[in-house]
Amino acid sequence: MKFLKVNINTAAPRDPEASILLIYTGGTIGMVSDKEDQHLVPFDFSEVIHRVPEMRQFKVMLTVLSLDPPIDSSNVGVEHWVKLAQVIQVNYHEYDGFVILHGTDTMAYSASALSFLLENLSKPVIFTGAQVPIGRMRTDARRNLITAMEIASAYKVGKPLVPEVCIFFNTVLLRGNRSTKVESRHFNAFHSGKYPELAKAGIDIEYDETAILPPPSAPLRIFQDLESQVAVLKLFPGINPSVVKAILEAEGLKGVVLETFGAGNAPTYPWFLTLLREAIERGITILNVSQCEEGEVHQGQYETSKYLKDMGVVGGSDLSTEAAVTKLMFVLAQDLTREEIATALTTDLRGEMSSRI
């Protein structure tokens, strides 16, 4: 896995107001039509100024790193998240902000993962992408890219306005580990139902400073390990023992995100509870999150979740599935006891959850 480096001169390279590292991993935003057969192909980022002439108005020093070859976001995995964290670590003191261009399908997972890998982050890391390729007339790519760059370079009294991992899309800036993709055909692709927007882009960009994480006092710390042996078990009425058994008894499994109903409720079938209990006894960590886009898990509020709490299922509060999966990967990769794992999962580490349950 390698990146190609391209230096871009915008309008005022001699006296830049900020420096930005733009990292292109792949996805719709970087696609144009091939002249011969009109198929979509990645465009040369050395020509980004020609594709997005508005960038000439930026007084920034801009460097582009392009993954070679670019990948579809459906193929993004743990190794890519670790590589992105390493790239930011290596370049952290050279740039004021970072913009990551990424396919939309798994962007919320990548933003969540990176938030956990980057502890004590004090600079903006802004993910963005597009629903329509940059080479098309009605593309949203230019607006998303320009605004993401503006946010990544936004400082006040020498301090960044948004010192955290975020997603900017359409008109909203969202905390990365609070985001979910909700739309595939319209421009408002991402939503954060359990946490307010960090900023709204209209004529001006209006920041909600009360929702943004405060800058840390400690130096940046990079983690480079994630446990990939996790699974998601989504409950549904009529789910049968063979399906649950196949997931919970998968070879090498270390953790499961259990998507339950409502406030964390699940069936009380004896076979279901037995399979969960046996999995926990084998050392598998089970993290309970709600299927609801809004609201949170309250294990024990109803009888149908009391059983889960009593057997040791960990309540995930208002974690999104994307944040739950990547947080579970992150926590399980640390050298922790079972009790320490449960404590870490129920503690707000990067603004990913509102409370400890």
Image: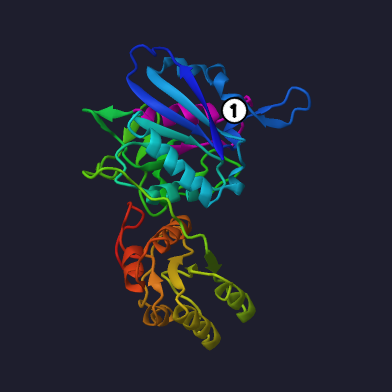
Quadrant placement of the N terminus: top right
Q: Position of residue 147 (x, y in %)?
A: 43, 29
In the rendered image, the vertical position of residue 276 relative to residue 354, given as above or below: below
Q: Position of residue 41 (x, y in %)?
A: 68, 31
Residue with the mark numbered 1: 134
Quadrant placement of the C terminus: bottom left
In the rendered image, the vertical position of residue 246 relative to residue 161, given as above or below: below
User: SS at mark 1?
Assistant: loop
> Looking at the image, can residue 203 be seen?
no
Q: Position of residue 44 (x, y in %)?
A: 60, 24
> Looking at the image, can residue 283 be seen?
yes
User: What's under tag 1, amino acid-wise?
Assistant: Ile
In the rendered image, the vertical position of residue 277 relative to residue 201, given as above or below: below
In the rendered image, the vertical position of residue 279 relative to residue 257, given as above or below: below
Query: Which one is in front, 59 or 219?
Result: 219
- Determine the residue positioned at 46% across, 73% down: 284
Q: Is residue 149 inside the magenta stretch?
A: yes
**Magenta residues, start to end:** 126-153
